[in-house]
Amino acid sequence: MGKKNDQNLNADSSGPVGEPIVRTLTMPGDTNPNGDIFGGWVLSQMDIAGAIYSGRRVRGRTVTIGMESMKFHKPVNVGDVLCCYCDTVKEGNTSLTIKIEVWVIRRFEQERIKVTEGLFTYVAVDENKRPIPINTHVRES
């Protein structure tokens, strides 16, 4: 689990924080009318990463209930390899707040560059989509 008290978003990180969850290649079909990767597409990749991470953590279904402190630091270009990293910053009775960082590897480069980050909150839900305690799903090892 991550640093519970460090919810500050910081563009000056020395490297990705958290677990790598999603890695994908940006394509021309992911662009906005100006030819840049559409911010909404990046946001959807972050939400997918958070859903995978939170679902695995609670060993069950989760739903996104909020996003806060979203900040874009640099643009994402066609041909970048986009990587989403997740780290738990707060765990409640039914919810998880996850810091999701997005780093890219530019075409033909090796260095990772942080392009955006945000805090996403997910709630564990039952089959009727009602919130349930996280520990209901989690089995002790």
Image: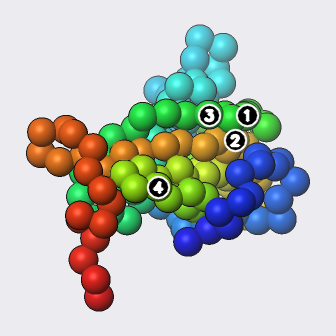
Q: Quadrant of the N terminus?
A: bottom right
Q: Amino acid at mark 3?
A: Glu
Residue farthest toward the left in the current orientation of the protein: 127
Q: Which residue is mark 4?
A: 92
State which mark lies toward you, 3 or 4: 4
Q: Is residue 126 above or below residue 70?
A: below
Judging depth in this view, the residue of 42 and 61 nearest the camera is 61
**How many marks are shown on the rendered structure?**
4
Determine the residue positioned at 60% across, 58% down. Answer: 89
- Residue 77 seen in render: no
Judge whether 32 appears above or below 20 on screen: above
- The amino acid pointed to by label 2 is Thr
Q: Is residue 91 left or right of residue 15?
A: left
Q: How far across and how far down the image is residue 35, in percent?
A: 64, 20
Spatial separation of the CA atoms under disc 3 and disc 4: 17 Å
Give residue 18's quadrant in the image.
Answer: bottom right
Q: Is residue 118 left or right of residue 120?
A: right
Which mark is in front, 4 or 2?
4
Residue 112 falls in which quadrant of the image?
bottom right
**Which residue is found at the position 27% from the left and 44% from the top?**
131
Give the secondary structure at mark 3.
strand
Foreground residue among 67 and 4: 4
The residue drawn where x is 65% and y is 24% is 36
Q: Amino acid at mark 1?
A: Phe
Q: Position of residue 15 (x, y in %)?
A: 76, 65
Q: Nearer the viewer, mark 1 or mark 3?
A: 3
Q: Residues within 10 Å of mark 4 (few under 14, many from 20)?
A: few
Whole-number angstrom distance, CA of label 4 to CA of label 2 = 25 Å
Quarter of the image with the C terminus in it? bottom left
Residue at the spot of label 3 = 68
How far apart marks 2 and 1 lie (CA) works out to 4 Å
